[in-house]
Amino acid sequence: MTERETINGVPVTEEQIAGWADEAEAGYDVEALKKRGRGRPGRGAEPSQVIALRLTTDEIAALDARAEREGKTRSEVIREALDAA
């Protein structure tokens, strides 16, 4: 193993790898894994769709400035602008 193999900057040891292999060989509780959250929570009754939006650097800067000023995310600012239209 080389020293370059890390997780979050911490070197991975042979002991960790052996432990992970033992855990995998013993098997996982599939039902427990299924209970883990899947992505972001929904925004309503219907599934949301992700869309691509092209903006200039000036538009992005204005969007980011407004989001920072209002303590919101880019998406929140864009959704509010659409609601106001």
Image (cartoon, grey):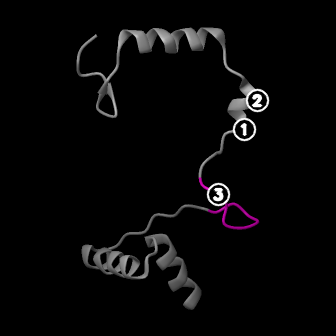
Q: Which mark sits nearer the N-terminus, 3 or 1?
A: 1
The residue furthest left is: 3
Can you say which quadrant of the picture contains the N terminus?
top left
Question: Circle 3 is placed at which residue position?
Answer: 41
- Crowding at mark 3 (Cα within 10 Å: few <14, some 14-19, many 20+): few
Density class for disc 2 (Cα within 10 Å; few <14, some 14-19, many ≥20) is few
Q: Are marks 2 and 3 in contact (CB under 8 Å)?
A: no
Q: Is residue 31 above or below residue 53?
A: above
Q: Are marks 2 and 1 in contact (CB under 8 Å)?
A: yes
Residue 43 in the image, given as x and y percentages of width and height: 66, 66
Question: How many circles with numbers are drawn on the protein?
Answer: 3
Mark before the other along the chain sequence, 2 or 3: 2
Where in the figure is residue 42, as x and y percent of width and height?
67, 60
Question: Which SS type dominates the magenta stretch?
Answer: loop
Q: Nearer the viewer, residue 17 or 53?
A: 17
Front one among 10 and 42: 10
Picture residue at 37% right of the left edge, 69% below the top: 54
Q: Quadrant of residue 8?
A: top left
* Residue behind mark 2: 31
Question: Identity of the amino acid at label 2?
Answer: Glu
Q: Magenta part of the protein: which range?
A: 40-48
Q: Which residue position holds label 1?
A: 35
Position of residue 45 measured from the top left corner of the image (x, y, whole percent): 76, 66
Quarter of the figure with residue 33: top right
